[in-house]
Amino acid sequence: MLDDRLSDGLHSLGLKIGTAQQQLLLDYLKLLSRWNKTYNLTAVRDERAMVTRHLLDSLAVYPHLQGQRLIDVGTGAGLPGIPLAIALPNLHFTLLDSNGKKTRFLVHAVSELGLSNVDVVKSRVSDYVPAQGFDVVLSRAFASLGDMISSCQHLLSPAGEFLAMKGQHPDEELQRIESAAFQVSTVDLQVPGLSEDRCLLRIRPCANRETE
């Protein structure tokens, strides 16, 4: 059953998430599965695989989040933003995407799930200018770390950081970034039920080192 798969995965991740929040995670998954039949929001069709590849993969970064205001850039169907917003109701998440069908789904999901800590913004990242910078700029959508930094740097608060969710370690990209006045640390992520490599890259402008 999906609830057992989720609860077992959360236990493996060492996360204590209440029963009500777990139900919200599954409700989100069902909404995603239903809308996906019409709008093709994700290539993953099987709900059991969605638990692993969407919910648990997103929640694997939970222990590494800092700050109060986070933006998920290129969020698509709300990943990783919605699972994290459900698990961390005291943090505020902005979900940014330029695709209209995806943001329509996000608005519906946020309303249906009652997520008062989530805003949905339909915009290209280059056109979006927030009233204040974010503590964390999070994404698993960018193929290139350089593109993520150059596209999203205006979203970052003075003491903020980028968190990039990746598969294999992008060693060549890391060398270029580290030589360009950024401090980078890498965390290997273990996603229960997933054999592929996963890692999280924490990227800060060197001027922010004193905030650690």
Image: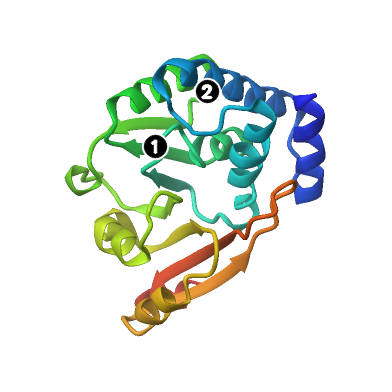
Q: Is residue 63 visible?
A: yes
Q: Residue at x 55, y 65 (%)?
A: 168
Within-10-Å neighbours for mark 2: few <14, some 14–19, many 20+: many
Q: Which residue is mark 2?
A: 32
Position above or below: 72 against 104: below
Q: What is the quadrant of the N terminus in the image?
A: top right
Marks 1/2 in contact by CB < 8 Å: the verdict is: no
Can you tell which mark lies on residue 120?
none
- Mark 1 vs 2, N-terminal side: 2
> In the current view of this chain or complex, which residue is farthest to the left?
127
Tell me if 130 is positioned left or right of 204 in this view: left
Q: Residue at x 46, y 34 (%)?
A: 78
Gap between marks 1 and 2, in whole Å? 15 Å
Three-letter amino acid code at the position of disc 1: Leu
Tell me if 91 is positioned left or right of 175 in this view: right
Choose between 90 and 172: the one closer to the eye.
Answer: 172
Tell me if 151 is positioned left or right of 114 in this view: left
Choose between 133 and 54: the one closer to the eye.
Answer: 54
Q: Is residue 114 visible?
A: no
Residue 83, position in %: x, y? Answer: 58, 36
Position above or below: 48 against 191: above
Residue 33, position in %: x, y? Answer: 55, 21
Quadrant of the image occupied by residue 46: top right
Within-10-Å neighbours for mark 1: few <14, some 14–19, many 20+: many
Residue 9, position in %: x, y? Answer: 77, 42
Q: Residue at x 31, y 52 (%)?
A: 133
Q: Which residue is mark 1?
A: 95
Tell me if 189 is positioned left or right of 69 in this view: right
Quadrant of the image occupied by residue 99: top left
Choose between 58 and 153: the one closer to the eye.
Answer: 58
Three-letter amino acid code at the position of disc 2: Leu
